[in-house]
Amino acid sequence: SVQAHKEEDNPQKTMEVNGLTPVPGSYDYDLIVIGGGSGGLAAAKEAAKYEKKVMVLDFVKPTPQGSSWGLGGTCVNVGCIPKKLMHQAALLGQALEDSRKFGWQFTEEVKHNWMTMTESVQNYIGSLNWGYRVALRDTKVTYENAYGEFVGPHTIKATNKKGIEKLYTAERFIIATGERPRYLGIPGDKEYCISSDDLFSLPYCPGKTLVVGASYVALECAGFLAGLGLDVTVMVRSILLRGFDQDMANRIGEYMKEHGVNFIRQFVPIKVERIEEGTPGVLKVTAKSTAGDQIIEGEYNTVLLAIGRDPCTRKIGLDKIGVNINEKTGKIPVSDEEQTNVPYIYAIGDILQDKLELTPVAIQAGRLLVRRLYAGATTKCDYVNVPTTVFTPLEYGACGYSEETAVEKFGQENIEVYHSHFWPLEWTVPARDNNKCYAKIICNIQDNERVIGFHVLGPNAGEITQGFAAAMKCGLTKEQLDCTIGIHPVCAEV
Amino acid sequence: GKNEYDLLVVGGGSGGLACAKEAAQFGRKVAVVDYVEPSPQGTSWGLGGTCVNVGCIPKKLMHQAALLGSALKDAQHYGWSISQPVHHTWSVMAQGVQNYVKSLNWGHRVQLQEKKVKYFNIRGSFSDPHTVRGVTKAGKETVVTADNIVIATGGRPKYPAHVAGALEHGITSDDLFWLKESPGKTLTPFVFNVSLECAGFLTGIGLDTTVMMRSVPLRGFDQASHISKKNHICFTTQQQMASLVTEHMESYGTKFLKRCFPTKVEKLKSNRLQVTWKNADLDREETDSFDTVMWAVGRAPDTKTLNLEAIGVKTNSETGKIIVDASEATSVPHIYAVGDITEGRPELTPTAIAAGKLLAQRLFGQSSELMDYDNVPTTVFTPLEYGCVGLSEEAAVQRHGSDNIEVYHAYYKPLEFTVAERDATQCYMKMVCLRGREQRILGLHFIGPNAGEVIQGFALGIKCGATYPQMMKTVGIHPTCAEEVTKLHITKRSGLDATVTGC
């Protein structure tokens, strides 16, 4: 057995860990949150409000390329935040071109410096990491930069960078460990390829890039890399943006193609080799067709894998305490109150089965869960009509049903789809595409033509979609939509 | 009957054209007369009305030009290297804008043709309740008779009374958008949203711009307590949203002459303009020279040449606008009016269009639906945009009493401002709600980039009777500015710091 000493209230208390372990009578903490990302931090800060003794464990296992980051999770470090900033950098490149038509004059040659951008982005992220540490300190939440795993009932082992182990006990736990990018499992993938975990802090310009995958991560990254002037190719196994409205997905792909992104469809890489060293070097990618025997080869400076993300649930000792996970996906099934099959263990965020992988959802779920646990609240997280936006070069905002799922659920004859192309006023003078921006709403005829799906493709899609999502929450119908006056001239009035 | 047309629309602007085209859908015989009396400076334009030619459209495009100027500065923080100096050429922008506007004029003419609406470019006036007479540019007299008539002649900018030289030497928004050469160093007295928007984009494209304010910046918009980050609460009347907008403009480079009003404008030998004004605070006269003086002192309804008194159409004695009832009917049974010309209605393109369409549907389509003027969203396109829908804080307090309303507010920072190192001090939003069980949302106000895009969807929500709890149940889209609306939770009443921290 191992004896562990804790520094806080009970310095003399020891505990047996191996074998039949009696559950300790009083715990070190009321709540231990494993994972300091969007969901975990929101839950921890909320619990501290109710004067609970809370600990957050957060640890980032470096990527195969060696990238790592601070407190805050995926969103802050290698997700939403750097993604949107680099997307903005690409949009500004387009703005530079437009501005000439609006009378601005400067030299023809405009260049982008990857390092300048990345440094600025990383500085901002650093300030967020710092902000989180301060916030936790101010709310008296204990934070440890250590890898947490369950070793017995109510007991967790925390291992820090130096390998020092400590044991902690808590009355309740929230697992919010999130996900990490998946690798292909082919020769050369871990050695030579990067993922989104590496991209946003890459200390050199990626150059000519192959993006493998058709997820929103793949398309968003390919989109902004192309916008910054890089030669980008996207290799897609089958369809784009699986799970999203396919009509909208195809429009996004078309737009990207017309704006300089190359697509290789129905191929998967089978081998990656390095033919030249350097930062970046030159990689040779061999790919096989999914529709036949054809083999192709290509040379790129960087290969970015964006084929999906896997939950960090396999190595945190869940088997030791009997928490069920979906063996195939690694996701954790929970009740509608985010409770696992072990009553004192909860889970939130990206690791949940059948729930949306979004920061605001994780935050909402975390906060409401804690209010139910400690403040006597009963409100559950509402996962219906959660809006989302894909920040591809032509942005896509959506809320509710895709056209396919609406047809599937209600039947073609019971839904009505209203749609329209539109030309943003700001695109007229610089003569940008006049039939690419598009909006559609899907209505349930039998339910008073209630709006059950909203889709918009155009600039500032996120800003536009947010209010519509609120309206859908209020049961928006087509009639109400029709009698709402538009703001002129904006895209949203369409 | 004996009249030639089922419907005659006088005025080919937003409201008029929408009404005419809708009526034509029902297979009716429709005619439109449109005429632009040149401005005192001689500016004129084609079919489409104020919005298309000298309003929303060119204004937003020039606003965009100014925003792109900011984007150029931001871009450098994001890694783009652009050689300095960067400068702006008015004529390139003006040509781009004017060409687009002309394409819209053309588009409208084509649409009227396609829908078989007859178009007369004449200055019409009533000779009897069913007859409008006018003379074409070629000098030919034209008479048009109709069973039903819709007056949609809109408004034109006013000139200030009692300022010598105002008419001869100043221009208005009617002229600004059609200038072939840069307006240069510009003074714009007084302050309505038009002059703030114009001053905003003029500053943005690099021109030396001064706004002269007699008193309140955005009269009619939200004027609740001035809330700096240090003092909160208090429901006394001063401007809040309006002052945030002007504060931003000041930090952006627009000059403001507060509590001043001009007394005369004289032309100098150099062709520049010498403006003299009274500074009410210092109680003295001041003077300076400018290249352009652009008046933005309000708009007057365009009814002078219509001959309304002769046919009995009643107008408001103070404003001159046509008095209409809830069905847009005037005091003469078969004569209606829509748009900026009507008394008590918002002066907005979308309301004119909606009212025009609904009117046509009631006249010819067996509909009885009236126009709903409640909860009309709107946006002021100043450098930092201000979008709003529903009640201002004052109106809510007045209607329900300050004890019955709760105001949630927040100062936020758009993500894109971080790397660009832009000042977000004035980025602000507030939601005015009823207290009590339901907590219905009465009004939403937002200052920040893309305010119009943000507000539009929420306007829908308010139309559906959205409540504060429903807003809180709506999950945010991350990262956007709009998501902060769904996270509003600090009340003015609490006095707590309303700055959004981290995500």
Image: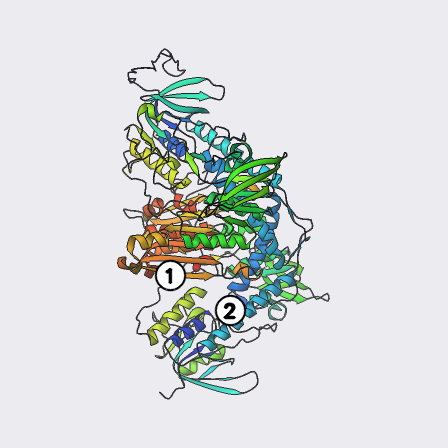
Tell me the residue that label 2 is attached to.
B50
Q: Amino acid at mark 2?
A: Thr
Residue B223 visible: no
Q: Are marks 1 and 2 on the same chain?
A: no
Q: Is residue B309 above or below residue B58?
A: below
Relative placement, left or right, of A142 versus B58 is left
Which sits in the foreground, A355 or A28? A355
Q: Position of residue B169 (x, y in %)?
A: 63, 68
Q: Is residue B212 above or below residue B145?
A: above
Q: Nearer the viewer, mark 1 or mark 2?
A: 1
CA gap, disc 1 and disc 2: 30 Å
The disc placed on residue A433 is none
Which sits in the foreground, A225 or B479? A225
Q: Position of residue B405 (x, y in %)?
A: 34, 48
Q: Position of residue A188 (x, y in %)?
A: 53, 34
Tell me the residue that label 1 is attached to.
A418
Which sits in the foreground, B502 or B123? B502
